[in-house]
Amino acid sequence: MECRSSVDIFTEWDIVAARQLGRNEAKSIGFGTVDQARITTAISELARNIYLYAGKGNIKIERTYDNNQYGITIIASDEGPGIADVRKVMNDGYSTSGGLGAGMPGVRRLMDEFNVQSEQGVGTTITAVKWLR
Amino acid sequence: MNLSVELSKEDSVQRFHIAGEIDAFTAPVLKDKLAEVQDVPGLQAELNLTDVTYIDSTGLGVFVGFYKTLKANDGYMKIIGVNDRVKRLFEITGLDEIIDIEKGVGENRDATL
Amino acid sequence: MPKEVEKQYKALVNRYINTKSENDLYAGQKFSRRFIEKEISPEEVIGIHKSALMELFPDAPEDFWHSFDFLIEMMIHYGLALQEHQSLIRKQEELELEMKIAEKVQNTLLKTRVPTFSDLDIGFLTVPAKQMSGDYIYFLSDDSNYASVAVADVIGKGIPAALCMSMIKFGMDNMQKQNSSPHVVLDVVNRIVEESVDDSMFISMFYGKYEVDGSVFSYASAGHEPVLLYKAASNTFIELDAKGLLLGVQPNATYEERSVVLDEGDFIAMMTDGVTETRTEDGFIDDEIIKEILTTVKDESAQKIADTVYQQLGEMQNFHLHDDFSIVIFKKGYKN
C-alpha cells in the first residue's frame, strides 16, 4: 500500500508546504501529536538543507507498509554539490546549517531509519522512515 | 589577553603588525592569519612585534612553522621591533641565527601604514 | 512501558490538582527522574501531560489543546539538544578513558632510572601541568664512569608530544653504547626529529654528561634555557649556555659543546621553562628568585634542592601550574 506526494523546494515558503504535507500524511496514518511534530521537524530540517545548500530539490512523502507495520517515509533529494564527508556531517556537534539547525544527527534521532546517499557534484538523496507503534 | 594581527601590503612585502600576548590561547589567531598568505610562492613577509609583550612556546611554534613554510616556498621572513624579553627568547632558542631579526623598527614605517 | 509511566503521571497530576500540597509536588520531582531514566524526551513529557489532562478535563476548550501542540513543537529542539549533549558526554568519557590509558603508556614507555654514583648526587622532579606532560627527563648511565641527562620540553602537549618523546628516547638509547658526547647526541636527535615532526612542532633540549674521570660536566643545548651552576667556593651562580638551534627546525643544525669542572659542593640546576617562567598574579618571577631559593638549600641533598624549588615556586602560584615543571640537580659530593 503506497501513497505518494511531493513538494519541490525553491523558496522558504516551500519548506512550510513540505511541513504541511508531511503533517497531514502523518496524521492520517495515525501518528500522535508528538510524533507528528517530530516528523514535521525532520522534514523541515531536510527541506532547509536543500534550500540553503543545494538551492533546489524535492521532498517526497510516502505512506509505507512493511512487516505488518505502517510508517511514513521522507525522501529528500537534490542535485546540489553533494556532501564531501558524510561521516563528518553525521557527527554530533557538526551542523551544516551553522549551528542553528538540528542537523543530520537530529533528523536521524527524530526518525527510526535514516540513509544518506551523496556524490560530490551529482547530488544527495536522504531517506528517513518512522514507524507507527 | 587579546591579540590583534593587522596585515598591510606595501610593494611586494606583506607586513604584519602584531599586538598583544602570543600564548597557547591566542596563537591560533596568529596562525590562521599567517596561513592566509604562507603558500604564496616567493612571499616576502615582515612581522612587526613592537607591540608584542610576550611570546610563549606555542607562539614560538607559530613563527617556526611560518618560517619553514616560507622557506619551502622560496619566501623570506623578517622580524622587526622585538623587545628585550622577546629578543632573549629568539636568542636562547637559536632562532636568531636563522631568522632575520631587527631589534628596532629602524625608520618609522608605521606612518605609512 | 511508557503506557505505565503515562498512567502513573496522570494519577500524580490528578492528585496534585486536588490537594495542591507540597508533598505531591515533591512526589512529582521524584517522578521526573523516571522520565530521565527512561530517556523520555521533553516533547514526550508534554505529550503525556496533554493526554493526562484530556482525560481529566474532557470539556476544556479546543483552543486550549492546540496550545499544547504548539508547545510540543517548541520542545522538539530542546529534546534534540539534550540527546546531543548526552551523546557528547558519552564520547567525552570514552576520550578521557583513552587519555588515561595513553598516560599510563607514556609513564611506562618513558620511565627513567636515576643513576647511582658515589661522588655525584642526583635529584629530579617533574610535574605535569595537565594530564600528559610535554617535559621529558631521561637519564643514561653505566653507574660507574658517566651519568648523562636529557632535559627536554616538547612544544605541543598530549599525545603528539608523547609520541615525539618516544622518538627521542629511542634515538638516545641507540647511542648509549657509544657513550656519545652531548653535541653528537643533539645532532642525531635533531635529524630524527626534523624528519618526523610537523612544521610547528619542535623541542628544546639540554643534554649534560658528567664523567667521573676528572669530574667534568660537558653539555650542549638545543634552544634550551641556560642552566645554573652553583660554585660552592665563591658562593656564586654561573649561567651555562651553549649555542644551538631548537630540535626539529633545520636538518643541518650544529651544536656547540662546552664543559666545566665540578668541585666538591658545586651543583648544576637544569630546568624547563615551566620553572624559569613561573607566573604569579604579579607577572613573571625574577630569575634571582630561583637563585635565592637554591642558595638557601645549597647544603642539602640534590633531591631536597629539587623538591624545595618546586615547593616554593609552587606556593607562589598556588600550585596552579601554567606549564609542566621539571628540574634536575647534579650535585658533586659524597652522599650522606
Image (cartoon, rainbow, N blue to C red):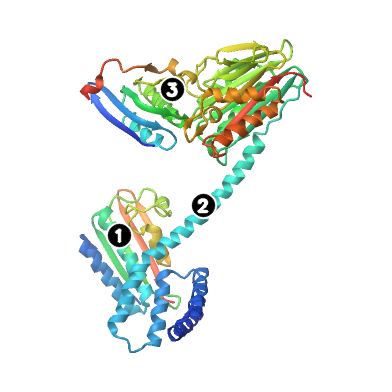
Relative image position of residue C103 (x, y in whole percent): 61, 41
Marks 2 and 3, how far apart at CA: 39 Å
Question: SS of the residue at dot 1?
Answer: strand
Tell me the residue that label 2 is attached to.
C92
Of marks 2 and 3, the one in the foreground: 3
Q: Which of marks 1 and 2 is in front?
A: 2
Chain for mark 3?
B
Residue at 42%, 78% (x, y): give it: C48
Secondary structure under the numbered disc 3 in the rendered image? helix
- Locate the C terminus of chain A by quadrant: bottom left
Count of numbered badges drawn on the protein = 3
- Expressed as whole percent of the image width and height from the top left, the position of residue B44 reads 30, 21
Q: Residue at x 34, y 17 (%)?
A: B104
Mark 3 neighbour class, 10 Å CA radius: few under 14, some 14 to 19, many 20 or more = few
Amino acid residing under circle 1: Ser
Chain under numbered label 2 = C
Residue identified by numbered label 3: B85
- Which residue is more in the foreground, B13 or C328? C328
Q: Are marks 1 and 3 on the same chain?
A: no
Camera-nearest label, 1 or 3: 3
Residue C25 higher or lower than B74, as above or below: below
Please indicate, yes or no, whether residue A3 appears anywhere in the rendered image: no
| Mark 1 burial class by Cα count in 10 Å: few <14, some 14-19, many 20+ | many
What amino acid is at disc 3? Arg
**To which residue does mark 1 refer?**
A77
> Split into 4 quadrants, where in the image is the N terminus of chain A?
bottom left
Labels 2 and 3 positioned on one and the same chain = no
Q: Tell whether label 3 touches label 1 (CB within 8 Å).
A: no
Q: How far apart are marks 1 and 3 (CA)?
A: 60 Å
